[in-house]
Amino acid sequence: MPPLSMSSVASALRSAGCVFAEDEAELILATARTPDEAAAMLDRRVAGLPLELVLGWAGFRGLRITVEPGVFVPRRRTEFLVEQALAAAPAASVVVDLCCGSGAVGAALAASLDHAELHAADMDPAAARCARRNVGPLGGHVHVGDLFAALPDTLLGRVDILAANVPYVPTGEVPLLPSEARDHEPLVALDGGADGLDVLRRVAAGAPSWLAPGGRLLIETSERQAPLAVETFRRSGLSTRLAVSDEWDAHVVIGTNTS
């Protein structure tokens, strides 16, 4: 078939309700290898498949992060968590990306640190498989299991940056999420329990044993949940502060192991 024009792709996307139709059209046409592939990608996007799954990748801190159906798509606001981690521990030598999903956070940290030992972990085998494609080229190791149980004991007391992009949507609010998340991402990556902080509590409780002296735990949360999240970190014995980005509408709780 003849190549699709930018205007025809953008028009189809706009008719389907895509707010950034021109930008999406440019990405689809740049990613597709043939006119037939471009047409198929356009059809999937018009049918409601998230753009990142149509493309097969998501942009994150200048990287192309491979994503697959059934795996959580990294959010641009989570770049703020990476920025905070790098600012807090610019010489980190051991990094863990817990609840890693596609491995975007770990990949972005490893790409910015010199020769850091990177470990990523997720309980979902599909996410772990995807993460290997993203952190493997950076020398990262991927583990499958429930939070800290997935990690090798050799990391105990050695972790400089423990980044955990845990699920934090309250159970009752999951049905209110945009359909792109609700219908295409795993519930385990979204549902944080009754108040959204169930997994955060577990991570905060276990983190001190894994952090090196001066090591940092960083977790993204919402503005509403931030005060309780900060208190949870403090109860776990971490020196705690909250970082906020108005630009990204992002809230990151940062705990330091001072023992």
Image: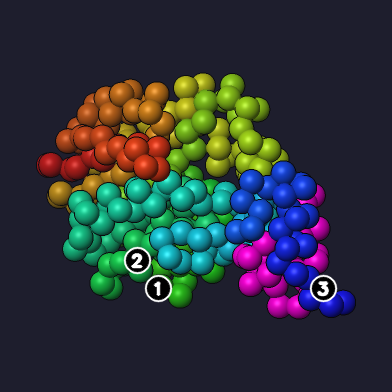
Three-letter code, disc 2: Ala
Mark 3 Cα-neighbour bin, 10 Å: few <14, some 14–19, many ≥20: some
Question: What residue did someone put label 2 on?
Answer: 110
* Horizontal and vertical percent position of residue 66: 57, 64
- Asked whether disc 3 touches disc 1, contact meaning CB atoms under 8 Å apart, the reply is no
Question: Which of the two labelled residues, at mark 3 and mark 2, occupies the earlier sequence position?
Answer: 3
* Horizontal and vertical percent position of residue 117: 31, 67
Real-space Cα separation, disc 3 to disc 1, in angstroms: 35 Å
Q: Image check: 1 left or right of 162?
A: right
Asked if 216 appears above or below 39 in the picture, the reply is above
Q: Is any part of residue 22 visible from this angle?
A: yes
Q: Which residues are magenta?
A: 25-48
Q: Residue furthest left?
A: 259
Q: Which mark is residue 36?
A: 3
Residue occupying the point 44% across, 34% down? 199
Mark 2 Cα-neighbour bin, 10 Å: few <14, some 14–19, many ≥20: many
Q: Image check: 5 left or right of 229?
A: right
> Is residue 124 one of those drawn in magenta?
no
Asked if 39 appears above or below 74 in the picture, the reply is below
Q: Image check: 129 left or right of 146?
A: right
Q: Which mark is residue 247?
A: none
Three-letter code, disc 1: Gly
**Most foreground residue, 155 or 6:** 6
Question: What residue did someone put label 1 on?
Answer: 139
